[in-house]
Image (cartoon, helix red, strand yellow):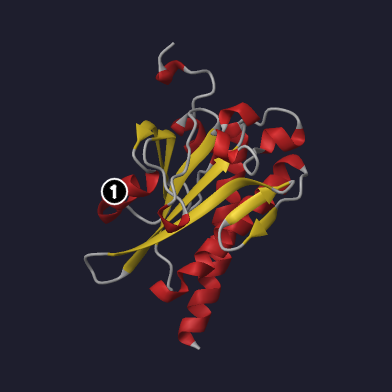
Amino acid sequence: MSPAEHPDRLDHEKLRSALSGLTIGNHVVVLEETTSTNDVVAQLAPARTEGLVVFAERQTAGRGQYGRRWESLAHNGLWLSVLLRPRISVAESSKLTDLLAQTIAVTVAQVTGAAASIKQPNDVLLGGRKIAGVLVEMRVEANGGYCAIAGMGVNVNHGIDDFADELRATAGSIAMFVGRPVDRHAFAIALLRQLDAAYREFSESSATRATS
């Protein structure tokens, strides 16, 4: 079976249709493999509007906070980046990191009923194990403004044997905690819908502060 024929491969049309009318997900790209979804969004950003989402089934150079490598097992997790243009300064980028981590935790609760916690600055935990991480990178654009590339990695259907030996004491997945497989499409759609609502509120609040 080729990677493109994998039964649980993400379908960009299915995702885009479910996100119709939202800012987040107005354009969705699904790649079988890339270095990092943050890198792809950075390349596409000059020609794209806010809300572009890029998924990769596998990353060969996924990265987390402080340049740490992020393991991205194909067809088991969600590895994605979103293009944002918030009205904040680079120094305030940690606010976006908080927003994304909170969004993941809320989505876990919505989809599974499980209560996730956040370990600052950017980790999401279930049962004391890390199931997700966030990486926000700010880039200068041609007009002198900034865009934010909001990367998220979520361990969805991993088993303990899917993690490297050195991670097995601390890493986990949503499926490991709830004891059943999780529909990746349903989780991705719920995550992006929640992000759209949370980011809209965040943007309105930022605009109010900028004009006050």
Whether 147 is drawn above or below 173: the answer is below
Residue 102 picture location, percent across and down: 63, 58
Whether 182 is drawn above or below 190: the answer is above
Label 1 secondary element:
helix
Q: Is residue 159 something one can see in this rendering?
A: no
Q: Is residue 69 left or right of residue 193?
A: left
Residue 80 picture location, percent across and down: 46, 44
Label 1 belongs to which residue?
44
Q: Is residue 53 left or right of residue 104?
A: left
The one of 72 and 145 positioned closer to us in this rendering: 72
Residue 62 picture location, percent across and down: 41, 43
The one of 207 and 69 positioned closer to us in this rendering: 69
Residue positioned 72% across, 46% down in the render: 110
Dividing the image into 4 quarters, which one contains the N terminus? top left
Residue lying furthest front: 166
Q: Quadrant of residue 145?
A: bottom left
The one of 128 and 99 positioned closer to us in this rendering: 128
- Three-letter amino acid code of the residue under disc 1: Leu
Q: Is residue 120 something one can see in this rendering?
A: yes
